[in-house]
Each structure stands twice: as C-alpha cells, then as structure tokens.
Amino acid sequence: AQSVTQLGSHVSVSEGALVLLRCNYSSSVPPYLFWYVQYPNQGLQLLLKYTSAATLVKGINGFEAEFKKSETSFHLTKPSAHMSDAAEYFCAVSVAAGNKLTFGGGTRVLVKP
Amino acid sequence: AAGVIQSPRHLIKEKRETATLKCYPIPRHDTVYWYQQGPGQDPQFLISFYEKMQSDKGSIPDRFSAQQFSDYHSELNMSSLELGDSALYFCASSPIPQTQGPSSLYEQFFGPGTRLTVL
C-alpha cells in the first residue's frame, strides 16, 4: 500500500519569495511521484513527475522537485512566487503503470502582494 | 491537443435519484480512472478500466457502477443518491504503452470534472 503526507494544509508566501511545499511518501515498492495543481473550480493539471529517471525534476511554470529516497520525500519548490501560483497543490504516488494515484491532503497556497 | 472530456460539467439531483456521468478519454488512451473529490478534500480513487475490463477498485459504494465501452469512453452510474455523494467527479486517462515513451505510462491526464450536487 502507498500513502502520501503533505505537511501544511495552507502556505502563505509573499510575491517573489520562495515557495516550498512538502511531501513525504510511503511505498513498499519504488514509487512514481507527481505534483498536480488545481485552480478553483478546475481540474487537476500535472506540474511534474518522477518516474525513476533524474532525481531532480523540472516542471511547468518554474516549479521543480527533488526525489530523496533516504528521506522518502518529494518536496516542490519555486524560487520566486507569482500571484498566479495561488492554487491548491496535490502530491500523489503510484506504484506501477496503469495504477491508481493516491493523493496527499493538498496544500493551499496564498500569494501576498 | 485533445483533452479528456467529461459530461455533464454540472449536475443537480435530488436524493434517491440516479445520475450518469460520462468520460471520453484522450484518443489512443486505453485506461480510464474515476476519482471523487469531496468539498475541501483530496481526490479519492473509485475505479479504473483497462481495455474495457475493470482493472482496479477503490472505495466505490455498491450503489455506483461503471463500465468502459468499445470506443473506450466510460460511464459512472450512481443510484439512490445521497447528500454525501455531492462532490467533484474526475475522470482521467493514460496512454496505450506502445504509442508513447515509457515515462508517459505513469501519467494520468485529468478531465475538468463533473460537479454533482445532491439536494
């Protein structure tokens, strides 16, 4: 079985500041990890994914995440927050192709001007 | 690029009524997944289909059923609706292995969702 824990249900950052969203996973087999973003009343958009290639993964909109097996983590970062980054972010894990995604509880990001 | 299509986008039903949600995957995607997202919650996996056969089942109530048709579209049928069924229902699809690179196999492409309100 796999699970995901996102630390902090809400994060507030100033525009231009670093965005750091924390995700820890639990999996009995090598995981495949994803970050999705959800804007209000919209669907889920993939930001980036880790599928056992490079441990540092770059995604869309300037986001990146680093897979750290020793820490069972896959934290999401962006060097400089923009107002358009205000949304809810979900970390998710899968254990095989065609397998379900298990999501974390989500982190809502508020960007202050 | 083509995306996952879900219909209807919004649906309002009364308690004990029946609802049918439809999902049209991206062309050449053969796997379909259904997720339920309650208010303020993370998406929860309901059920998935691969090549028209059920491939996995999550926390889907017995009142719900789903199937995938020969054209790969899927329908989620919900009966005896309850207030607690009010949620956003997402469909996602993933590609046929032979048509894209290996890493794409693990990616699920989500539709815009159907917002179901049960009164």
Image (tube, rainbow, N blue to C red):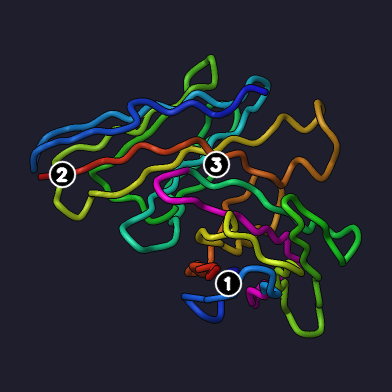
Q: Is residue B67 left or right of residue A86?
A: left
Q: CA distance from mark 3 to mark 1?
A: 22 Å
**Image vertical order of residue A42 relative to residue B3, above or below:** below
Kindly identify which chain the residue marked by label 1 belongs to: A
Which structural element holds mark 2? strand
Instruction: Report the residue marked by disc 3.
Output: B55
- State the residue at coordinates (28%, 28%): B20
Residue A89, given in percent of the width and then of the height, sits at 56, 62
Q: Which mark is residue A4?
A: 1
Q: B60 or B116, which is in the foreground?
A: B116
Which structural element holds mark 3? strand
**Disc number lying in front (3 or 1):** 1
- State the residue at coordinates (43%, 56%): B44
**Disc number lying in front (2 or 3):** 2
Residue B59, given in percent of the width and then of the height, sits at 38, 56
Q: Are marks 2 and 3 in contact (CB under 8 Å)?
A: no
Which structural element holds mark 1? strand
Extreme residue in the right direction: A54
Q: CA distance from mark 2 to mark 3?
A: 29 Å
Instruction: Tell me, yes or no, whether the highlighted magenta stretch contains residue A37.
Output: yes
Residue A25 visible within the image: no
Kindly identify which chain the residue marked by label 3 belongs to: B
- Residue A92 occupies quadrant: bottom right
Kindly identify which chain the residue marked by label 2 belongs to: B
Extreme residue in the top direction: B71
Q: Which mark is residue B118?
A: 2
To the question of a shared chain for discs 2 and 1, the answer is: no
- The stretch of residues the image draws in magenta is A20-42
Kind of residue sitting beneath label 2 = Val
